[in-house]
Each structure stands twice: as C-alpha cells, then as structure tokens.
C-alpha cells in the first residue's frame, strides 16, 4: 500500500443504505466520518427499491421526509396477491403507525443520492466514490483502520472505528477473521423489467401464484419491476428451455402484462439474485463493527433487507455517537449494538425461512392448483383487520428504531 494515510474517527466501508445513513447520522452528531464506496456511482439495477414506513419515520425524525417525497416515486398502500386466479388482499398499510402509512417505491440510487447530498452538507463527512476497502489493519489484537484501493493508488485510513456495511459479500468481515453462518435458502430470484402503460393498466403491486411458479410485480410507473422465484440452482435448466418459453410462462402467470411480456427477448435482460440467509455469531471486534447484510444477510421475502439495515444504522448511531465523538469507544459499546439489533434480525430471518420453506418451496414444485386457498389466505380475504398484521411486520418490523441523536452544536 501507499505510505500515505488518513485519520478519522469512523470509517465506513460500503455506500449502501446502511453505510450512508450511519455516516450521515454520525456526522450530524459531530463525529468525523469517511464513507467508502467501491463503485464510482450508485447506478445499479435490481437493488432493493422499497422504502418502508419504518425508514420514512427515520427520515421524518431527521426533518428530511418532505424533501425526500418530492423525488419521483410510487406509493403502495396495499399489497394484493393473485393466488391461483383469486384476488387476495395481503397487507393494508393505511393503519400503520407512521408519519406516512405507505411503502415507497423509488430507485435505490435516488435514495442514496438523496442521503449523500444531505451528508455532504456536513463539514465532518466525506464520501469517497471508487474507493474499495481491501481489508482491515490490525494492531495489538484490535482493528485500527482499513486499507483502501482507488484508481489512483492505494492508501490507508486509520480510525477509532471501522464499520463493515459492505453487504453480504463483505471483504472486511473475512479479513478480520469473523465468522458467518449460512442458514440456507431453497430459492433464487430472477429480476427483470417489463414495460407498463399507466393509461391502460390499473394493476397493483403484488404477487401472482400459479402451480409451479411465483412472480412478484412492482408497479414502477412506466414499467414493472419483476421478481420471478425459482428453486435454487435451477437457472441453467430454465435457460435450456429458451427465452421464448420463459416469456410465455411469465405471461401466463400474470395475464395483465399482456403483450408487454414480449419485451423479454434475451437472457441478458434477466439478472440472477442468488438468495442467501446468513448471520454472524458475533458482529464485532475491538475497533470493528458489522451491520446490515454484512452481519445478517436477508432473503428478499418481504423486501425488508434495506429497512432492517437502516434500523441497524440508527441503533449504531444512537449507541456510539457520543463515545466516538469523545474518543472513549470500547468493545462494550460495540457489543451493545449487537445486543440491540441481533434479536430483530433473528426474528425476521426465522419468519423468512418459514415462508420460504413452508410457502414458496411447495408452490414451486406444485403441479396443480389446490381445491381451496390455504386458511391464512382465506382469513385475509374475509377479515380486513387481519391485513394490518402483515403490514405491520413488513412496514415497521421488529423493534423499530427512532433517531435519538441531535445535531451537534458546532455544525
């Protein structure tokens, strides 16, 4: 590495939702922060694009909600399923206890640009794009910094705290010798987009289930963002049947797509998300903390991963900001973050695993529609008040966090 080095109080690897929100919160609270993002911009397709009421609450705590909602977006107040040809309302967000009782669909890069712009206005915040965290720097049994690579060369950043918010494929976790346990997932997801005519199509965001198939469609205004669920490892067999067969299958599952499904003409339009559920037995070492997918990779079930990661960031800021600012951070402080957030992650993962194993996997091997809907779906059809429970679990989650830090007087 280059002999040059930088010094800061907190260095965050990963400019995703968790990393940028934590960076903004800490800088707002008076902590010197450097955030590293290995890409030169945030423009990547098929990342999680759902902002749930729990995150809207965080933005409201920060006084940013109204400005955020000025960005082009779609608002989802109800999730509806088409289950073997029968309409089933799944979740009603209108009763969720939040400043805005709906889910927002917005390209993740717009959300990240918004948070980055807010953070750049703070004098003690620095975002370095095109800067990849290669591994931690260890001295005396603790982590004291991170090695960084850019197009111009390498250098080191020394910090009181290094935060790994670099996702499920984190480099920092492995370089620090921390373990992660794979909990298994029986599914993968294929992401693709299909044009939508807003003038003629009144269909809602939701999912369509047919024997052997599950398709989620997110209404993005002039296009549908689609997630096609497949048994894990089955993509090659699907490709062997040809894109025409896949296109026909998609159209049969969601007839409302109509001729728009013909836009699928090449497998290059389809991106594979290899689903992983994992968690770390311990999220920290002296000088290092893992949050978000780096600590607990989530399934796309419920679209809760981004919002759970942001909750981690809020909790970490609440518990660590003062200690970082005053140079008195200890391992007990880092352990407190895991103690606060480990249980919500575990509960959410258990629910995702149950849904994957008990609901999704049987659907994918089914060859005929059942004679009647499963009892839980019949109950949701019949009793509107029951739809508040899935809305609460998806929209707010387990142990939601509120911003407890205040802007530092020097800012």
Image (spheres, rainbow, N blue to C red):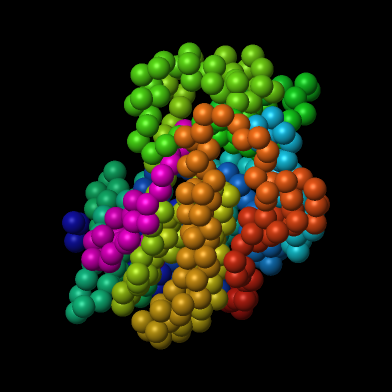
Q: Is residue 17 visible?
A: no
Which of the two residues, 325 or 105, is positioned nearer the viewer here? 105
Q: Is residue 237 above or below residue 364?
A: above
Magenta stretch in the rendered image: 163-190
Tell me the residue at 76%/45% (across/down). 381
Image quadrant where one finds the C terminus: bottom right
User: Hey, which quadrant is residue 52 in on the image?
Assistant: bottom right
On screen, residue 376 versus residue 325, left or right, reads right
Tell me the residue at 44%/74% (across/down). 338
User: Hey, which quadrant is residue 85 in on the image?
Assistant: top right
Quick check: is 128 in the magenta stretch?
no
Residue 94 at x, y = what percent?
79, 54
Q: Is residue 285 above or below residue 177?
A: below
Residue 126 at x, y = what percent?
45, 59
Residue 106 at x, y = what percent?
63, 42
Image quadrant where one finds the N terminus: bottom left
Which of the two residues, 402 or 398, is positioned nearer the viewer here? 398
Which of the two residues, 17 or 360, is positioned nearer the viewer here? 360
Outermost residue to the front: 371
Q: Is residue 282 visible?
A: yes
On screen, residue 237 versus residue 135, left or right, reads right
On screen, residue 344 versus residue 390, left or right, reads left
Tell me the residue at 46%/70% (across/down). 342
Residue 406 at x, y = what percent?
63, 76
Which of the two residues, 208 or 380, is positioned nearer the viewer here? 380
Q: Is residue 324 above or below residue 22?
A: below
Quick check: is 169 in the magenta stretch?
yes
Tell me the residue at 54%/16% (across/down). 248
**How many labels, in total?**
0
């Amino acid at each position: 590495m280059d002999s040059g080095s930088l010094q800061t109080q907190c260095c965050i690897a990963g400019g995703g939702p968790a990393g940028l929100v934590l960076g903004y919160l800490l800088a707002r609270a008076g902590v010197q922060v450097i955030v590293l993002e290995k890409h030169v911009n945030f423009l990547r397709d098929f990342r999680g694009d759902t902002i749930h009421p729990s995150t809207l609450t965080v933005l409201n705590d920060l006084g940013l909600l109204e400005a955020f909602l000025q960005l082009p977006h779609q608002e989802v107040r109800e999730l509806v399923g088409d289950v073997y040809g029968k309409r089933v309302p799944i979740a009603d967000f209108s009763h969720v206890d939040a400043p805005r009782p709906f889910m927002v669909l917005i390209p993740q890069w717009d959300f990240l640009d918004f948070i980055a712009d807010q953070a750049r206005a703070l004098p003690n915040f620095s975002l370095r794009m095109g800067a990849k965290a290669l591994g931690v720097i260890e001295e005396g049994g603790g982590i004291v910094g991170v090695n960084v690579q850019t197009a111009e060369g390498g250098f080191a950043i020394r910090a009181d705290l290094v935060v790994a918010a670099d996702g499920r494929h984190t480099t920092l976790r492995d370089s620090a010798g921390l373990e992660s346990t794979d909990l298994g997932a029986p599914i993968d997801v294929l992401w693709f987009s299909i044009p939508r005519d807003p003038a003629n199509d009144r269909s809602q965001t939701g999912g369509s289930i047919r024997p052997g198939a599950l398709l989620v469609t997110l209404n993005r205004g002039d296009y549908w963002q689609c997630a096609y669920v497949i048994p894990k490892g089955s993509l090659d067999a699907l490709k062997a049947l040809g894109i025409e067969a896949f296109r026909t299958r998609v159209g049969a599952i969601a007839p409302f797509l109509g001729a728009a499904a013909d836009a699928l003409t090449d497998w290059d339009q389809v991106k594979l998300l290899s689903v992983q559920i994992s968690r770390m037995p311990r999220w920290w070492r002296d000088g290092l903390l893992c949050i978000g997918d780096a600590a607990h990779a989530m399934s796309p079930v419920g679209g809760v991963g981004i919002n759970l990661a942001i909750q981690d960031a809020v909790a970490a800021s609440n518990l660590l900001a003062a200690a970082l600012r005053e140079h008195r951070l200890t391992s007990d402080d880092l352990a407190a973050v895991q103690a606060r957030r480990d249980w919500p992650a575990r509960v959410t993962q258990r629910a995702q695993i149950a849904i994957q194993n008990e609901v999704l996997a049987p659907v994918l091997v089914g060859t005929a529609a059942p004679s009647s809907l499963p009892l839980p779906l019949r109950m949701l059809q019949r009793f509107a008040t029951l739809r508040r429970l899935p809305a609460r679990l998806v929209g707010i989650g387990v142990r939601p966090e509120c911003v407890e830090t205040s802007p530092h007087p020097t800012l």
